[in-house]
Image: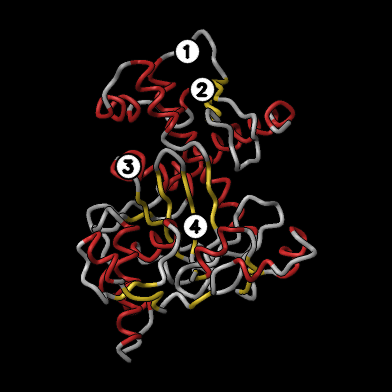
Amino acid sequence: TMECGDASGTALLDIKNRTWSKKLLKCIDSQRDLSKCLPRLIQSDDIAGHVTKKAANLFGIPEGALVSSGGGDNMQCAIGTGTVTNGVLIASLGTSGTLCGSSNKPIVDPEGNLAAFCSSTGSWLPLLCTMNCTVSIELARKLFNISLDEFNQISAKVPIGSNGVVIVPFFNGERTPNYPNGKGCICGLTPDNMKAENIYRASMEAAIFGLKLGLNSFMKLGFDAKEIRLVGGGSKSKLWSQMVADVCNLPTVSPDVPEAAAFGAALQAYWALLKSQGKGTSIEEITHEHVKTNSNAVYNPISENVVDYDLAYQKYLRYVENFKPIFSA
């Protein structure tokens, strides 16, 4: 079996109607009905089955234990951070970066910046994914042999815009924007600003500018963003958390439970358990009860910073656009 959040990652799902797409399946094989090869779709709060005797013996899990419907990592992370109501966004700051939002209606981006996913809660979860987020920071740290604490301390002293240094962080190629041949580039260097501290700061800004591209796509499609919930290694940095708030001009918060995807899977299983016992409730009620945010990790945008970051972001976009003939081929 499969629920629609995970199924939408196959690119074979009609996400608007939450069924396997007959049209797409016919494009792959016009002679056979490939729907017979695909898992049966179930609701996100359904159970997929129970632990078998063989599985119980292999893994030490009690025989007969409920197995919930499951879902993709981003879908479970959304549940674990309480990103289940319209207008809430979650940003994951890891090696790759993701920005996704809970929506009570399907969101399809004609420009292709956002992937049109269903959520694992019965609604939708449009998602931006960048190939490069903390990559630029780790590479800069390695290049200059500097600790993360030192990196943050020095970067905090550099003004917004990194004194004109701009990093285009497409070290692993990039999917958003669609630059499969992308490379990492340090731009805007002069004899005066070619300093390590400017590269440190620029590497931090670049990662968030990549997420800003996705946020703008959300806004274009009418998504009413209210706040961003931060997870991933980068969310532990106070400087970076404030940077996200200022660049995106939205308040940011961090959930109490850092392993958000695992926590979300547990909450989804609890949701399915209650339904199986005839005690059905909504996932919104469950997350409201169990998901808490850290009151010491709330960052509100600072108005003068918002203005300065917008200027720096526009400069970043000009470099990204000018690299298009080289990186998109």
What's the CA distance linking mark 4 and mark 3? 17 Å
> Dot 2: few (<14), some (14–19), or many (≥20) neighbours within 10 Å?
many
Q: Quadrant of residue 181?
A: top right
Query: What residue is disc 4 on?
Result: 100
Residue at the outermost right position: 30
Residue 224 in percent (x, y) is at: 54, 65
Residue type, label 3: Gly
Residue 309 in percent (x, y) is at: 50, 39
Residue located at (74% from left, 58% from top): 28
The answer to whether residue 13 is above or below residue 179 is below
What's the CA distance linking mark 3 and mark 1? 28 Å
Q: Quadrant of residue 175?
A: top right
The answer to whether residue 74 is above or below residue 46 is above
What's the CA distance linking mark 2 and mark 1? 8 Å
Q: Which mark is residue 233?
A: 3
Q: Using the image as rendered, state which of residue 116 and residue 24 is in the foreground.
A: 24
Residue located at (35% from left, 27% from top): 155
Residue type, label 1: Met
Query: What residue is disc 1 on?
Result: 194
Question: Which color mode does the image show?
Answer: secondary structure
Q: Which mark is residue 165?
A: 2
Q: Which circle, 4 or 1, is nearer the viewer?
A: 4
